[in-house]
Image: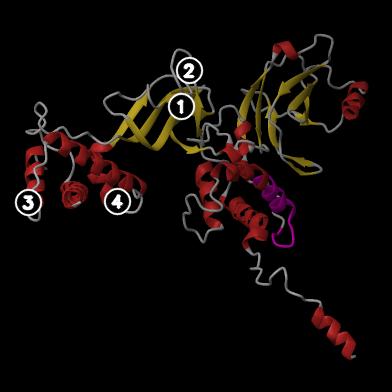
């Protein structure tokens, strides 16, 4: 575990090895956020390939239990605002039908092509879920809504998901002194990606500077 | 002694070399579970009556028997009728004279009612003077009902039997209750299940192009003769 300041120092140590451009905190934040976006997108999609990623991704793994009988989960509203939704892992549902309790049944996705099949529309033992983008009254635009089938006798549902990456805020409040929640492997990946991004940006800036210098030179020679 | 989900999982594995194929070709447990009552019924009938593969056991497998109490539904009874009707899940029809009904009788005593197959039998007995004292009680299972003749005071029935679909029993909880099927019957169920999916399992790979001219050789042969 490292503090955010340590990450920043590491970044500048490696950055100084081949360049000496000064990067402002606000630029550094956007570089690290862009790096997070690409790194975590890759990790989310390859989750099944390597189990160790799950420990690395632990700070982003979130689980919310909603204890009501509604058959829908609104991904924008029902989940904690501090943990914005990014990618679904699974949905488990608990049904109570009279004296029979079906606890935490994993819902399978219901594809459009399967909707016509009566054996794919979900039972208490094998529930299904489906994305339905329906505008709700009083809200603008379409919300991402998951509907669970069967829709009756639900007592609670638990949604496990990846939250959006945790934004970097170097130089803001107590962020620098705080400990970064990611594991060392993820931090290394983030640093690599950030250096790549910063390097590209730096080279491009240098190129344009040279070009403008050449142009000015050319213009002067005219 | 397995749960329904365990039987379904075993069936899926039986066509996947006993490996777990989650998300594989035959892994729709929901559909497999829906097939189990049908296969179980076939297996029970096959085991009882015998087939080329299985010797006739001529005995009802006790592991397949379920029991339930059936209460009378007052709204369904008509005062002018001389019989009672109870709702009861359908029994397996094992052979023309043997049904899945093992015991139909009084709830708190070992008083088995006698089975009749037709209303004519009841009528004949009535004409001969039976069924009037309330002591000789007869029953006739029709579809998902049990008709009771000879006693109109009955409030509830105790029924033991092999039912078409064990999930039809209101008290049966597939999550926690042992599925009423013996291992002996299940081995037949597995064979039947494999036979049902054998077409798709054993289909040979089609290596011949659809464009291949398979006629010309035959024609040449004919021409050479």
- Quadrant in which the C terminus of chain B is drawn: bottom right
Cα separation between marks 4 and 3? 35 Å
Q: Quick one: label 4 or label 1, which is nearer the N terminus?
A: 4
Determine if residue A193 is in view. no
Label 3, secondary structure: give it. Answer: helix
**Do residues under tags 1 and 2 come within 8 Å of each other at their CB atoms?**
yes
Nearer to me, B135 or A106: A106
Whether marks 1 and 2 lie on the same chain: yes
Residue labelled with disc 3: A16
Asked if the stretch drawn in magenta spans residue B95, the answer is no
* Label whose residue precedes the other's in the sequence (4 or 2): 4
> CA separation, marks 4 and 2?
38 Å
Q: Disc 4 designates what residue?
A: A51
- Residue density around tag 2, few if under 14, some if 14–19, many if 20 or more, within 10 Å: few
User: According to the image, label 1 marks what residue?
Assistant: A145
Residues at circles 2 and 3 in contact by the CB criterion of under 8 Å: no
Q: Are marks 4 and 1 on the same chain?
A: yes
For the record, the magenta segment spans B40-55
Q: Is residue B95 above or below residue B143?
A: below
Q: Nearer the viewer, mark 1 or mark 3?
A: 3
Q: Chain of mark 2?
A: A
The CA distance from mark 2 to mark 3 is 52 Å
């Amino acid at each position: 575990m490292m503090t955010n300041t340590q990450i920043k120092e590491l970044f500048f140590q490696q950055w100084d090895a081949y360049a000496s451009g000064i990067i402002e905190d606000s630029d550094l934040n956007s570089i690290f956020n862009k790096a997070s976006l690409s790194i975590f997108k890759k990790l989310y999609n390859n989750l099944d390939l390597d189990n160790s990623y799950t420990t690395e991704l632990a700070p982003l793994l979130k689980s919310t239990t909603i204890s009501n009988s509604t058959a829908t989960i609104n991904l924008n509203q029902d989940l904690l605002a501090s943990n914005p939704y990014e990618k679904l892992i699974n949905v488990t549902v608990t049904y109570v039908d009279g004296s029979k309790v079906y606890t935490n049944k994993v819902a399978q996705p219901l594809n459009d092509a399967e909707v016509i099949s009566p054996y794919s529309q979900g039972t208490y033992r094998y529930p299904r879920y489906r994305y339905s983008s329906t505008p709700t009254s009083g809200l603008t635009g379409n919300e991402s809504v998951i509907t669970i089938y069967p829709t009756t006798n639900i007592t609670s549902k638990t949604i496990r998901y990846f939250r959006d990456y945790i934004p970097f805020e170097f130089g803001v409040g107590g962020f620098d002194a705080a400990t970064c929640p990611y594991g060392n492997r993820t931090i290394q990946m983030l640093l690599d990606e950030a250096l790549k991004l910063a390097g590209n940006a730096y080279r491009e800036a240098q190129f344009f500077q040279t070009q403008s210098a050449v142009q000015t030179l050319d213009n002067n020679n005219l | 002694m397995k749960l329904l989900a365990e039987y379904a999982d075993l069936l899926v594995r039986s066509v996947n070399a006993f490996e777990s194929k989650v998300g594989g070709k035959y892994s729709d447990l929901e559909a497999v579970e829906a097939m189990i009552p049908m296969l179980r019924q076939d297996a029970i009938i096959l085991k009882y009556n015998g087939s080329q593969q299985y010797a006739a056991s001529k005995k009802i497998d006790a592991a397949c028997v379920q029991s339930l109490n059936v209460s009378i539904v007052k709204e369904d009874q008509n005062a002018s009728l001389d019989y009672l009707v109870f709702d009861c899940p359908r029994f397996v029809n094992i052979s023309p004279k043997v049904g899945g009904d093992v015991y139909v009788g009084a709830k708190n005593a070992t008083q088995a009612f006698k089975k009749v197959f037709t209303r004519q039998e009841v009528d004949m007995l009535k004409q001969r003077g039976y069924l009037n004292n309330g002591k000789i009680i007869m029953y006739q299972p029709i579809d998902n009902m049990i008709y009771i003749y000879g006693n109109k005071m009955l409030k509830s029935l105790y029924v033991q039997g092999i039912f078409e679909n064990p999930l039809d029993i209101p008290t049966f909880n597939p999550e926690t209750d042992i599925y009423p099927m013996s291992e002996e019957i299940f081995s037949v169920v597995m064979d039947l299940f494999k036979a049902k999916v054998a077409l798709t399992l054993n289909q040979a790979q089609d290596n011949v192009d659809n464009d291949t001219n398979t006629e010309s050789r035959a024609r040449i042969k004919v021409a050479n003769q």
